[in-house]
Amino acid sequence: MSEGLLSDLLVVELGRDVAGPYCGKILAGCGAEVIKIEPLAGDPARSAGPFKDDDPHPEKSGRFLHLNGGKKSITLDLEAASGRGLFKRLLAQADILIDNLGYGVLAGMGLEYAAIAAANPGLIIVAITYYGQDGPYRAFAASELTAYSMSGYQYLTGDPDREPVRPNFALAQYQGGAQAATGAMAALMARDAMDIGQLVDVSIVEATCFSHGSLSAGLNLGMVYRRAGSRNLNFHPKFQYPSVTLPCKDGYVHVHFAPADPQLLAVLMEEPKLGAPELWDTPMGHADDFDALCLPWLARYDKREVVQRAQELRHPFTEVLTVGELFDDEQFKARGMFVGVEHPVVGTVTQVGPPIRSTETEWRVARAPLLGEHNDEIYCGRLGLSREELVILSENKVI
Amino acid sequence: MGPRRRPLEGIRVADLTIVVAGPTATGVLGDLGAEVIKIEHIVARGDTSTALPKAPHVDEDRPYNRGNWFHDLNRSKKAITLNFVVPEAKELFKRLVAMSDVVVQNFSPRVMENHGLTYTALREVKPDIIMASLPGFGMDGPMRNRTSFGPGIEAVTGLGDLTGFPDGPPMKPGNFVTDYTAGMMAAFAIMAALHYRKRTGKGQHLELAMRDGALQFIGEPLMDFAMNGRVQSRIGNRHPAMSPHGVYRCNGEDMWVAIAVGSDDEWERLRSALGDPEWARDERFATVTGRLHHQDQIDGHLNEWTGQRSHYSAMQTLQAAGIDAGAVLTTSEIGTDPHYNARRFMQPVYIPEAGPIRLSRQGFRLSETPGEIGAGPNFAADNHYVFRDLLGLTESEIADLEAKQAIAWRPVTQMGRL
């Protein structure tokens, strides 16, 4: 069981920040050998918090440690001709190249995708940018915040009476990285069937837009969804309800109707008015009434009790958990979703467990590499450079 | 050179998925050329995505064939019916599995066990079958049998507590985010498993718990707790190391522009793009720590500037100066946006009983073998193709199945429960 789904693949990652590294991490989790090429100063994620003990050290960035588990790190200056030569030698052995340095960055260094592809006909090039490889916004300045806004997600997120808001995590960039991995697999399927490589053009903004589930209603029905707190966004009076986060005795719970028997909510909450047919005839039209009828019962119990009682009646309620509470969660504990791994600088570092489990293969949970930790192994071992050459390259600040 | 095939042509998927997460996964596979056979219950389109809105066809005949969201989620699929309460239906399903490469299901774990249709059972009829299951909480563990939907998974995985304003309640990021992320991860895993099968000849059971997938997305807050014991929560639109960083009111109803400025160089460019106003020359705003400390004042001034223009106009003015700015787009604005349209993100699809609609592709575009969005199926549209042509049943055998309510041609109840 030590093999992964993709153990036969060699991936070269020119990844920075979140999206490219997350794509690389998924492939590394599936057993691919992922060689991460970092500039001499390191992936900018190494400068991003949170840091262990708030010490801004390049090996102590929580973002970097989370996103680069199981990879190998080499340093390389692609601005130098010698660096580009080594890059090309490495690509000759690779199955997949992940690049999210930014729109036009590689081409600006004389490494156009067309030339890379011509030299490596079977190579799958995964180019991840915010806006994609063409279109009028392709060279726009962008970040997590503006990707979230341009994807249409932000208009859907927040209090209806306040400005649109965003989550305190990089949802858009993670979406981009995840869909880049899926796109890479689509290209791998084509390569397995037709023996061709190709360019996978990934837009973080498009990936995020695909996953808010509201575009087709806006395009085809003229129903422009708008943010509604934690309620479902479809405002048609006959749409299902409740689906909402409400306060209980010690926090919040997510209250959700039971499709098989919604009127059982009245039994759960010991509130006969919740069984009224007019409520269930137009549930979304009575959203305020539902909330008001639920609140007194919810206020009597803490979130664990609310959810336990609801699930006993097959109502799909859940607790609203804080990040700290996730670490005490019995289900995550039972499934080993937080794994301690030894790291030479940080000590024991927590890595998130597998998103994919399977009967034949294993997901790799391992620590992130130190900057340039695998220079010897890759340059000498894989590319056959001598120690003398390694020293010369180092003195010239190529590696 | 003639047109290339799509990447998954020749791959058949037996698709038992319902609602959002599972159908998203099989929709990706369908767009990439797999033959996806959606297996629906006879009672109704047992799928909340067929619920309203059905407009503009809601009052017409066969409303179950006209659901807009249904056709979005179930693009590029065929559809048949099977009622597993009838033993013959389970046997037909197994015969279909024997002719398939992949089975996908997103019920809670007990459902397939109750039907006797576990991976172990299906491997008996197709040794190299790839089965993908998308439970909410997992196939094992104390919460395995909890029922759940996407919005609840967000809540119980920390995403809700991290979304919103510091002085307000937990919010929901967008709409059904964990359903889509789980579906996308499942499509990834299924293709990786097809690659593994090509290399080793082995199939396998893949488990993609929605909650385990969503947990990957909040790595930074998780690491902060694990390393420092700090519990991150909601921070509105602010950023711990960038200022100004927010969403600003524009000249139009509920119209906003997002602006993100980090370095001092970017601040200088922003000042100049605004016409070097007096307020921005304030010494306190010249450094990033000063700007973080005085963001309320800066936001007030920026709101005055953005309030005089549309979101697109503010975005274009700032982008011309290299400032990171983006309009807060609505779905209808995305439909007419020049960039989305130049990249053909939305593509026209003709649905026989719902007419022409536009659907979006995924966030990736392949240069040599792009996917293609196909129409979703009418209810039971492919009963004949599957039962007669693939499985070789006679017309009288098919009629017999219908009489036993093992299959149907129309939903037994026309409208699903909303």
Image (cartoon, grey):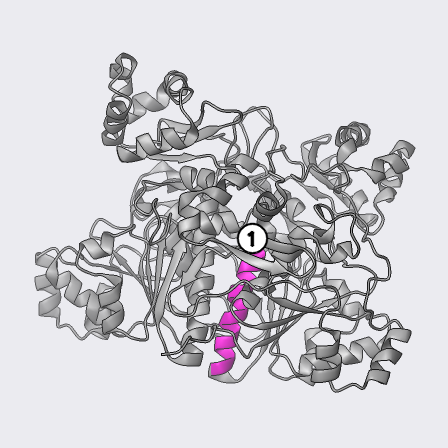
**Position of residue A24 measured from the top left corner of the image (x, y, whole percent):** 39, 60
Q: Seen in the image, is A54 located left or right of residue B403?
A: left
| Residue under the image location 86 percent in, 84 percent down | B396
Q: Position of residue A61 (x, y in %)?
A: 36, 45
Q: How many marks?
A: 1
Q: Does the magenta stretch include residue B74?
A: no
* A76 with respect to A283 (left or right): left
Report if residue A365 is visible in the image.
no
Which secondary structure type mostly characterizes the magenta part of the structure? helix
Q: Which chain carries label 1?
A: B
For the residue marked with disc 1, what is the amino acid?
Answer: Arg
Give whichever of A331, B243 is nearer the camera: B243
Q: In this rendering, is residue A176 above or below B246?
A: below
What residue is disc 1 on?
A: B358
Quadrant containing the N terminus of chain B in the rendered view: bottom left
Q: What's the magenta region?
A: B182-198
Residue A68, image x and y in percent? Answer: 38, 56
Residue A200, image quadrant:
bottom left
Q: Residue at x 37, y 28 (%)?
A: B314
Give me the residue at 55% from left, 76% from top.
Answer: A360
Q: Nearer the viewer, residue B350 or A112?
A: B350
In the depicted structure, whether residue B360 falls above or below residue B368: above
Q: Can residue A58 be seen in this view?
A: yes
Please state the horizontal and vertical placement of residue B308, each as a whole percent of the image: 40, 19
Position of B201 with respect to A136 (left or right) is right
Closest to the observer, A377 or B11: B11
The reply to whether the magenta stretch includes residue B190 is yes
Whether residue A97 is situated above or below residue B281 in the rendered picture: below
Indicate the secondary structure of the residue bearing disc 1.
Answer: strand
Counting other residues with Cα less than 10 Å from the Cα at mark 1, is it few (<14), some (14-19), or many (20 or more)? Answer: many
